[in-house]
Amino acid sequence: MSSVSEVIDLAAHCLGLAQSGGSSGGQEGGATIPDEEKNYLLRCVNLVAGDLAMHAVPLVKSKTVAVTQGFVMYAMIDKNLTEVVSLATRQGKKARFTPYSDRLLAEDGIYVVTYKYLPGTLTEEDDLPFPAAVGVKAVAYGVACEYCIISGRNNEAVKWQTLFLKERELLEDKKPQKAGVMPQRKWY
């Protein structure tokens, strides 16, 4: 699995934020990143992780819940829940449910709920919550884009956004679009 610190290091390298120095950064002969910049990059990692979880690589969990009085609150399932995928009995039979803005309506009983969720706030020591298919490069491009936007480097942000969206399309199993290709004319 990729770690958040690897993403921050790659994004800082891409953006030219890493200062070459001695062994004060923890790595011998490695580059150091100023703490203020590291905090900004960490915020950007959390933004990009949420974006990837919403659009490209949904994070899915299952949890056993008890429905009483005809409903269960989403907060009882997971505070970062975004969508309920399915509700099934313990035996695996699908159960009918009605999603509301703050609760899930179903008949009383014990169920296994499968749902999509957003990752929590990541720290530098955490691993990325995505499968191995989501590489450090894809997340680092998104982090570089977000950092450029908050820094006012809009021209550079466009470059990183283009690279990030291409990586995201590959993750979504979509064919990347070729820019500016028009079909050949046919004369009848």
Image (cartoon, rainbow, N blue to C red):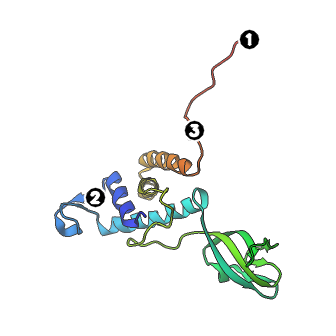
Question: Which residue is painted at 49% across and 73% down in the image?
Answer: 121
**Residue 108 vertical placement versus 19 (above, below):** below
In the picture, the quarter occupied by the N terminus is bottom left
Q: Which mark, residue 18? A: 2
Which residue in the structure is indicated by mark 3? 177
Judge left or right: residue 105 versus residue 153.
right
- The one nearer the camera, 156 or 60, is 60
Quick one: quadrant of the C terminus? top right
Residue 82 sits in quarter: bottom right
Q: Which of marks 1 and 3 is nearer the N terminus?
A: 3
Between the C-alphas of marks 2 and 1, the distance is: 60 Å
Judged from the image, the secondary structure of the residue bearing numbered disc 3 is: loop
Q: Nearer the viewer, residue 11 or 138?
A: 138
Q: Is mark 2 on a helix, strand or loop?
A: loop
Q: Where residue 137 sits: x, y (%)?
A: 42, 53
The residue positioned 18% from the left and 64% from the top of the image is 28
Rendered image: mark on residue 119: none
Q: Which of marks 2 and 3 is in front?
A: 3
Reading the image, the residue beneath label 1 is 188
- Alpha carbon distance from label 2 to label 3: 33 Å
Q: Outermost residue toward the left?
A: 22
**Nearer the observer, 22 or 98:** 98
Q: Please state the horizontal and vertical placement of residue 186, each as a whole percent of the image.
A: 68, 16
Q: What element carries label 1?
A: loop
Residue 68 placement, left or right of 20: right
Question: Residue visible at 38% across and 69% down?
Answer: 39
Q: Residue visible at 59% across and 48% down? A: 173
Q: Which residue lies furthest to the front in this view?
A: 91
Query: Which mark sits nearer the N-terminus, 2 or 1?
Result: 2
